[in-house]
Image: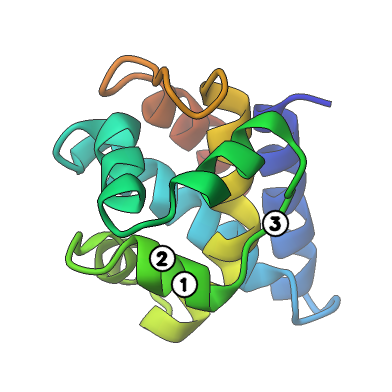
Amino acid sequence: MGLLDSIEGMARDGMGAQQGGEQGTAPNAQVAGGLMQALDEHPGGLAGVLQHFQNNGMGDQVQGWANGSQPTATPQQMNQGLAGSGLVESVAAKAGVSPQVAEMAMATILPMVISHFTQGGQAAPPQSGFGGMASQILGRFI
């Protein structure tokens, strides 16, 4: 299953939660959509996010996410790696959730994005484009 399939699945799960299903998955869908929008607007896109992690001493974690040896992160790792970037706050605002909820959901979502769009944590996609495609998919469900 590809990244966009995973994000689309989160959106479907979130839609079910919003319509009376389990309540735990809706924030992940909201945050996934918010993350895609925020990445399109973030200086440097995904490459800029990777740079924040590198600058904040988290290069080894990024490498683990990129090669799949560490498939998820912790909210504390999100906080440390993205400190000073404004990304968590931007995602939270776009998703309509608190920064704490955004951090928790991003601990699962962002490593998937990094794994899918990087090669060994070094190369990033163009600064925009993939977020718009994911947003279109998410727009059908959210």
Q: Callout 1: helix, strand or loop?
A: helix
Real-space CA distance between mark 3 and mark 2, rounded to the nearest whole angstrom: 20 Å
Q: Nearer the viewer, residue 85 or 140?
A: 85
Labelled disc at residue 72: 3
Marks 1,2: beta carbons within 8 A: yes
Q: What kind of colouring is applied to the model shown?
A: rainbow
37 in relation to 93, above or below: above
Q: Indicate left or right for 93 with 142 as reference.
A: left
Which residue is rendered at x = 47% and y = 72% of the image?
Answer: 102
Real-space CA distance between mark 1 and mark 2, rounded to the nearest whole angstrom: 8 Å
Q: Amino acid at mark 3?
A: Thr
Image quarter (top left, top right, bottom left or bottom right) of the N terminus: top right
Q: Position of residue 83 (x, y in %)?
A: 26, 69
Q: Is residue 140 something one can see in this rendering?
A: no
Labelled disc at residue 124: none
Of the image marks 3 and 2, the number of the one nearer the N terminus: 3
29 in relation to 84, above or below: above
Real-space CA distance between mark 1 and mark 3, rounded to the nearest whole angstrom: 14 Å
Q: Which residue is mark 2?
A: 95
Labelled disc at residue 102: 1
Q: Amino acid at mark 2?
A: Ala
Which residue is rendered at x = 34% and y = 34% of the image?
Answer: 46
Which residue is rendered at x = 35% and y = 40% of the image?
Answer: 50
Q: Nearer the viewer, residue 74 or 104?
A: 74
Which residue is rendered at x = 19% and y = 40% of the image?
Answer: 41
Residue 3: quarter of image: top right
